[in-house]
Image (tube, rainbow, N blue to C red):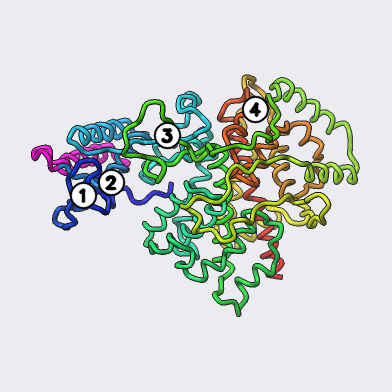
Amino acid sequence: MMASHPGTDFTCKANGGNSSGRVPGSGRHQSESESELSPALKSLAGLCSRDAEERAAALDELSQAVLLCLGVDRPGSARLCKQTLLHLLRLSGSCPLREVRGKATELLRTAQDHGVEVPRALALGPSAFIHAKEMMKEGPDQDILVESFLSSGRVDHITMVMALHPAYLSCFLRTQHALLELDGPLPRHWRHYIALMAAARHHCSYLVQQHSAGFLEAGGEESWLSDLQHAPSKLRSLQTLNKLLAHRPWLITQQHIQELVYPGADPRWSLAELIHAVVLMAHAHALCSLVWGCGINPEPDHIGGYTFQPPSPGHFPRSPHSPAHEDGRQELVDGAMEVEVLMKRMVELQQQQEEEECTQEEMVTRFERERSESIPTARVRGTPPDLVLHLVEDPEFRYEDFAPRGEQAPPTMRAQDYSWEDHGYSLVNRLLPDMGQLLDEKFQVVSNLTYHRMAMHEGVDTHTLRKALWNYIHCLYGIRYDDYDYGGVNVLLERSLKVFVKTMACYPEQTTVRIYQAFWRHFRHSEKIHANLIVMEARLQAALLYTLRAITHYMR
């Protein structure tokens, strides 16, 4: 989704393109002379043509260019740069066009036959939590995968997982494209830099690498990626807002906004620029929840996604989703709630809510009980990995329960006082045209998304379960709906599901396969991914509401 242009770095340098000039394991050295590099080829970009004949021609051109670089008529002169090899590796594994996938696989095999050490992917499939065969069995939508490839030149792992819900994926891709690529108040390379600053808060190497590639492609300076101090002070001034948005958005006040946009501020942000930056940061924070919550594997051309070493028998590479240890004391309920019991509870709850009317005092009591419930979350990952550590300021700042026991809790945000529908939507649309509409469509789609089934049962109305999930996440962020009975959350959300949801929404980098597997054990993976999408979007909306409220107060 955020790839560099597919045809910009196809060259015929020595295998691996390493700075020492040595071809790994071959004894041959590359010359840095420009005359030994072939001109950049357009064949990779041509593979994204919507015209089948143009794609076939580009595929033939790609094949000829690779064979030329391999020097098939000149034994011992094989030359392929690392980036070209990684492009081929990615195409061989994830391109939805069979002929492209097959040709890339064939070219890698040919390169290997000519003595070039070729990379191999370290992971099978897009998710460490879902076996590749199970993913294919549930049937990602192929049409939308082809469309994604033709539009951007790649199909990344996030897209593959979201393709299990094509209606949502379409909205997501439109929104992300508008945020990162379409006309707006912020330059393109700044947008990617803001997003990678946000992703670093949750230790998300996956998104940091995605946006680093987009940043460089958009003309960003490489030095900015090595240290925050190399970035302009205007970007660095977002750091306080970034960490609050990521971990404790209820602490954001109009004072934080004033410090950035006040006429005397140095450097000063316009309100339009700030709204763009806020949506970018909140989008990236929420997407981190999905990356960790679905166990998204590194891309085959990411650091940690490939190796040039041959596989050794019995060795399985460690996934970023498999931490070195897990706290054995972590409280996880063994066994998921039986599907039939959950369905029965949904029906009974609906009948009860229709027949009984709760007092407002009782509704508030149930909300407070839910908000202050102790849900254990084990800390299985400590400091951020080296890849992101230099992009994080104050790495120890993290989520704290909205209402810690024995402490004065900040005031609850009543949805009736400040809501997305009545307040946030119009403010975003006014300052960042069309973005409010795009976000609203995405919120609506994920909230209403249903296939009328639950595990092995068809014809099921899942509305009460979806609403309980959404409102529970907002409850964790201190947002209360006066007309919602929070007693339903306890009835429908078993403890292992609450552990997963709270970890994913509040400490996504602590999510593990154990937590993922513990809830809804009889449900399809696509249903668990649907739950992930609800968590992601509810978290996004909650963070936006607090920030937009602060901006509204500033503007008064």
The answer to whether marks 2 and 1 mark residues whose Cβ atoms lie closer than 8 Å is yes
Label 4 crowd bin: few (<14), some (14–19), many (20+), radius 10 Å: many
Q: Are marks 2 and 3 in contact (CB under 8 Å)?
A: no
Q: Is residue 324 left or right of residue 101?
A: right
Are the residues flagged by discs 4 and 3 in contact, CB closer than 8 Å? no
Q: Earlier in the sequence, mark 3 or mark 1?
A: 1
Residue 373 on image: x %, y %: 78, 42
Q: Residues within 10 Å of mark 1 (few under 14, many from 20)?
A: many
Q: Residue at x 57, y 37 (%)?
A: 325
Give the Cα distance between marks 3 and 1: 26 Å
For residue 123, the mark is 3
Q: Which residue range is magenta in the image?
A: 50-77
Q: Nearer the viewer, residue 79 or 455?
A: 79
Confirm whether the magenta stretch covers residue 492.
no
The answer to whether marks 3 and 1 mark residues whose Cβ atoms lie closer than 8 Å is no
Q: Amino acid at mark 3?
A: Ala
Query: Farthest residue toward the bottom?
Result: 264
2 or 3: tag closer to the N-terminus = 2
Kind of element beneath mark 1: loop
* x and y, in percent, of residue 367 in the image: 81, 44
Q: Which residue is the site of mark 4?
A: 520
* Image position of 75 (left or right of 399): left
Using the image, tell me which numbered label, if any, was put on residue 508: none
Indicate the quadrant containing the C terminus: top left, top right, bottom left or bottom right.
Answer: bottom right
On the image, the x and y values in percent for residue 418 come to 74, 56
Per the image, label 4 sits on a secondary structure element best described as loop
- Label 2, label 1: how far apart the Cα atoms are: 8 Å
Q: Which residue is mark 1?
A: 13
Can you tell which of label 4 and label 1 is closer to the viewer?
Answer: 1
Was residue 76 drawn as part of the magenta stretch in this picture?
Answer: yes
Give me the residue at 35% from left, 29% from top: 312
